[in-house]
Image (cartoon, grey):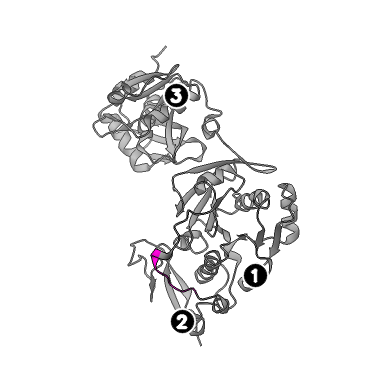
Amino acid sequence: MKQKTMFYCTECGNETLKWAGKCPACGAWNTIVEQPELPKAVQKSGGRAVRSAMPVRKACPVTDLKADEEIRFPTGMGELDRVLGGGAVKGSLVLVGGAPGIGKSTLMLQICSKLCEFSKVLYVSGEESEHQLKLRAKRLRVESSSLYVISETSLGDVLESVAAEQPDILIVDSIQTLYNDALDSPAGSVSQVKDCTMALMQLAKGQGGITVFVIGHVNKEGSIAGPKVLEHMVDCVLYFEGDQHTSYRILRAAKNRFGATNEIGVFEMRDAGLEEVENPSEMLLSGRPDDAPGTCVTCVMEGVRPVLAEIQALVVTSAGGNPRRTSNGFDYNRAAMLLAVLEKRGGLKVSACDAYINIIGGLWLDEPAADLAAVVALASSYLDRPVPSDLVAVGEVGLTGELRTVNHLAQRISEVQRLGFKKCVVPAHRAGNLGDFPGLELIPARNIGEAIRAALRPSE
């Protein structure tokens, strides 16, 4: 008899009886995927037989619950602790997502060196054998008798290993390789990924309070095999980003029930593993060309950390009738708006030119504080006049060409001063009450015209 199937939205989790191009619940396009319907016996048991063996927890009044703060512990990597909100939380379920080969497994195995100093760690790998794990641990200099490894893909066997070893921390690499024998669907399908993650969540929230780290691969669409299916189930979602052809990696929190989601961690991939980059501003500005038109530095806030980033722009005469607009690391619609403001309020005829904007280092600048630096870089490329290498521009640009202030401006300027810059273009109505910054000249500007004249050198 043919098995019945259901359809499932990878964005919101809505289930439907038939496929549709657009999800009727959340409105997302091309997110409906097919999954086999669970057998009735499996549905009654919650999807697997091992659930029935778990103790039944009784409800209690909220007044009887303890309001103690969560128990945090360091992972041994300050950048990871920063993204997690100060360290990992006992009894939490953390999902680490990213493209294959980006360094997720390296990060998880590397933190075992510190975690094994005060806890027992069980590393479950469904992609590598124990011998391969030993070779990688030796390369990363991870040697501890408190680290237990097992190469297993069966969910039941993994839970039995957890019951036998009683670890404090469980690392699963990866969730796409786990499967439940009670389901007929293959490993990596929506039903298998959801069911295995639910079992791990119950394990983390149980009486023992095991901290679980789950690795999830992201494909190009970010669906089915990716962590989009699991984001609503876990406590924390971390995304490991970066180009495999470059050495730098950025760790972001897309969801965090125990901390902020606007922090980032920066790492550098080396032969001996990942190395923390404590000062990402110096990394992002390294190799910056001198006296090159079309580049300007700005200061953005990544959580509570000010980060200096370089914005590059290239404006050239269009060869066709329809000028091309391209942005990498910068919002496309905002870039188009800034180009329109630059022509209307700045007097530069950029409508007939191709315009390209690029953010160095893999950052994504999504706050208005980068507007002024983008406008200055575009004007610099259009006029072919370089911006001084010791100048930074910070401010939001309005549709009338005026400059608006941004939050944490004093903290941004302190970071600019610390890194040795000599000039900083800021909105005029805030320049007078920012305090004194020795060695740094604050250049007030009311609109983009004044900012461009102050930032660009006069032609020789």
Q: Residues within 10 Å of mark 1 (few under 14, many from 20)?
A: few
Q: Is residue 97 above or below residue 384?
A: below
Which stretch is magenta? 57-63
In the rendered structure, which disc, 1 or 3, sits on the residue that comes first in sequence? 1
Q: CA distance from mark 1 to mark 3?
A: 63 Å
Element under label 2?
loop
Residue occupying image coordinates x 75% and y 50%: 138
Residue 320 within the magenta-colored segment of the rendering: no
The spot of residue 40 in percent (x, y) is 48, 84
For this rendering, which residue is in front, 185 or 378? Answer: 185
Image quadrant assignment for residue 266: top right
Q: Specify the quadrant that holds the C terminus.
A: top left
For this rendering, which residue is in front, 423 or 102? Answer: 423
Residue 61 within the magenta-colored segment of the rendering: yes
Residue 293 numbered tag = 3
- Give the farthest residue toward the front: 64
Element under label 3?
loop
Q: Residues within 10 Å of mark 2 (few under 14, many from 20)?
A: few
**209 sits left or right of 390 in the view:** right
Residue occupying image coordinates x 39% and y 64%: 63
Which residue is disc 1 drawn over?
163
For this rendering, which residue is in front, 403 or 344? Answer: 403
The spot of residue 433 in percent (x, y) is 32, 23
Q: Residues within 10 Å of mark 3 (few under 14, many from 20)?
A: many
Which residue is disc 2 drawn over?
4
In the rendered structure, which disc, 2 or 3, sits on the residue that comes first in sequence? 2
Q: Please, what is the dominant secondary structure of the magenta stretch?
A: loop
For badge 1, the amino acid type reads Ala
- Give the farthest residue toward the top: 460
For badge 2, the amino acid type reads Lys
Q: CA distance from mark 1 to mark 2?
A: 34 Å
